[in-house]
Amino acid sequence: MKTGTTEARGTHAPRRPAPVAAPSPTRARRNPVLRVLAESADLALRNLLHLRRTPGLLITCLIEPVVYAMLIGYVFGNSLGGPAYRSYMVGGLLAQTVAFTTTFTTVGLSRDLEQGMVDRFRALPISRVALLLGRTTSDLATCVASVAVTTACGLLMGWRPHTGPFQVAAGVLLALLFSFAMSWIGVFVALVAPNTQVANSLGLIWLFPATFVSSAFVSGSSLPGPLSTLAAWNPITSLAGALRLLFGNTPPPGFRVQHDWPAQHPVLYTTACSVLLIAVFVTLSTWRYRTRTSR
């Protein structure tokens, strides 16, 4: 006769483990804005780490400012004012440097599209905007390195800021804001181009005229006909003028300066153009990304 229980025989019935509460989502996952920012930061870090496999892009963004500084400062600069011109042109050189950030964005994103990386990211539960924002953010970090190299070249050529640290910091921040806006143009160009080769061509075919039909390196007043008006309202002209104003760099003797409204309010005009470019091309790029990846 079996009268003993399990406990009487000295054994214990197996106990079920206590249910573990599911981890609650973090604040960054609950808030849509914080989620997009966190995903963008992860993708930006991925892009920066990927530069180790494509060092050519990083070398280009570091060597290109040196080439332009030597070419414009010494090949053309001696006939435009010598040392005085080289100090004055640094604002234009910085404006050109941040404008050319567009090409790095165009090439980087078009490579991801061509190699299928974007299709892999689409399989992940991440925002469409985060993928594009990660690209522009990583290229902004690359632009910081280009600006540092350009500034070093200017210092070696004799350029010096003649204002306080707050004005200099404001000039650098304004240049980075404009660079971020130009990166979104690069995103849109990469999304409309069918492959990397076409994207690279499209990224440069409009950038050179936009840079040189300006007062970055010469006076816009010397340009003929409507090109003078175009240069006056070119955001690259206003950025160069804003940097010269914030750095306290005056034009060399005999250098004609434009007096249009953007020239009189360069900081305000550059800021407004940057915000407008971001608003327009974020919208266009998100729309184009949705239509291209839905096929």
Image (spheres, grey):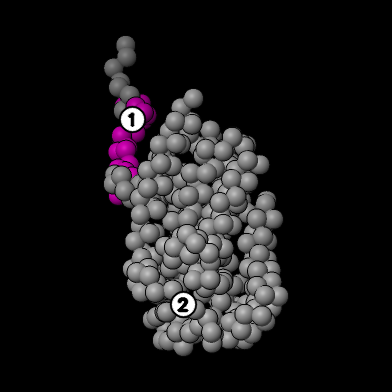
Residue lying at the far front of the rendered structure: 225
- Please give the range of residues in magenta: 8-29
Point 43% across, 86% down: residue: 163
Amino acid type at mark 2: Val
* Residue pointed to by mark 1: 16
Would residue 159 be counted in the magenta stretch?
no
226 in relation to 26, above or below: below
- Compared across the picture, whether 13 is left or right of 186 comes to left
Kind of residue indicated by mark 1: Arg
Which residue lies at the image location 33% right of the left edge and 24% below the top edge? 6
Which quadrant, please, contains the N terminus?
top left
Q: Give x and y (percent) for residue 182.
A: 47, 55
Q: Residue at x 59, y 35 (%)?
A: 194
> Eyeballing the image, is 216 above or below 41?
below
Crowdedness of circle 2 by 10 Å Cα count: few (<14), some, many (20+)? some
Indicate the secondary structure of the residue bearing disc 1. loop
Q: Which residue is mark 2?
A: 257
Query: In front: 257, or 151?
Result: 257
Q: Is residue 163 above or below residue 141?
A: below
Marked residue nearer the N-terminal end (1 or 2) = 1
